[in-house]
Image (spheres, helix red, strand yellow):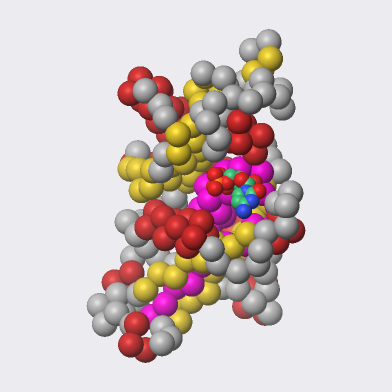
């Protein structure tokens, strides 16, 4: 996020990609895309492309990091070197460590960790193509992959960012909007109960803008929740869903 607007992002009341202020980018969800994972999901939000893979519950290694009372959730967000305009140096950096931590905490209230003492539940989120909103796309994919793995959860988590461009509060920023806009605020929530499980803010919003943005993001999370739910129902209403997995 850079200070101020370097280029015009709203022309004749429309954003550069033609969207209205309160419009999401197109979302596509595919479940069970990886054979070796216990649960997996491929998800697109506009030009973001992400794969989430879930393994476990399985024995936690190293053993000294085990928790005798509950499972340990490991969450690794990773951006592929080819996923951005300038090649990203491979491996973890400050940004990916922060995103992994915040994303893991977004799932803390829903995963029933106490069912699996001494075990690990591992979530890998790989960004294949990035265009802003990758942490939120990753959380949406991870949520579906966790459900696909059969990890007991009280609910799904849904996630989206709102921000401010050319002085307007808008939903789901693209890369060019994020780079030239005034604020970016990703949130994650349990849509069914309206419980926020993560909220970050980059840039500045007034109190009124914050309230409007939060309302907008919460409404969008309800839409995303319905898409996640529909994708899971479609996958498991076909009787082959689970059977296929057992045969592999
Ligand atoms: O992706 P998200 O909005 O969650 O996080 P961000 O740190 O606000 O990054 C915004 C966007 O900047 C990413 O989605 C990428 O498109 C881009 N980016 C990049 O090009 N190179 C990086 N090393 C990090 C981010």
Q: Is residue 8 left or right of residue 65?
A: right
Instruction: State the image coordinates of residue 179 (x, y, percent, origin top left).
Output: 61, 36
Residue drawn at 67 percent across, 23 percent down: 7
In the image, is residue 129 part of the stretch drawn in magenta?
A: yes
Instruction: State the image coordinates of residue 123 (x, y, percent, origin top left).
Output: 51, 67
The quadrant of the image that shows the N terminus is top right
In the image, is residue 87 part of the stretch drawn in magenta?
A: no
Asked whether 81 or 162 is in front, the reply is 81
Residue drawn at 49 percent across, 35 percent down: 184
Location of residue 106 with respect to 242 vertically, above or below: above
Location of residue 222 with respect to 130 vertically, above or below: above
Q: Residue most toward the left?
A: 69
Asked whether 68 or 100 is in front, the reply is 100
Asked whether 29 or 132 is in front, the reply is 132
Instruction: State the image coordinates of residue 82 (x, y, percent, origin top left).
Output: 74, 58
The quadrant where residue 51 appears: bottom right
* Residues drawn in magenta: 119-143
């Amino acid at each position: 996020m850079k200070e101020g607007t370097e280029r015009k992002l709203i022309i004749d009341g429309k954003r550069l990609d033609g969207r209205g202020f309160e419009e999401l980018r197109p979302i596509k969800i595919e479940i069970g895309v990886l054979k070796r994972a216990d649960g997996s999901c491929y998800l697109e939000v506009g030009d973001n492309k992400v794969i989430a893979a879930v393994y476990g519950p399985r024995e936690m290694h190293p053993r000294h990091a085990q928790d005798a009372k509950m499972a340990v959730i490991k969450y690794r967000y990773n951006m592929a070197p080819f996923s951005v305009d300038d090649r990203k140096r491979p491996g973890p950096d400050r940004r990916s460590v922060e995103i992994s931590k915040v994303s893991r905490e977004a799932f803390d209230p829903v995963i029933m960790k106490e069912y699996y003492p001494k075990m690990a539940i591992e979530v890998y989120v790989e960004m294949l193509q990035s265009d802003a909103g990758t942490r939120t796309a990753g959380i949406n994919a991870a949520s579906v992959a966790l459900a696909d793995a059969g990890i007991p959860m009280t609910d799904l988590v849904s996630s989206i960012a709102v921000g401010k461009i050319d002085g307007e509060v808008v939903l789901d920023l693209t890369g060019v909007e994020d780079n030239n806009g005034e604020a970016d605020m990703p949130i994650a929530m349990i849509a069914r109960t309206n419980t926020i499980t993560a909220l970050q803010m980059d840039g500045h919003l007034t109190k009124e803008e914050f309230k409007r943005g939060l309302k907008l993001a919460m409404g969008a999370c309800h839409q995303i929740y319905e898409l996640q739910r529909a994708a899971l129902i479609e996958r498991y209403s076909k009787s082959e869903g689970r059977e296929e997995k057992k045969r592999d």
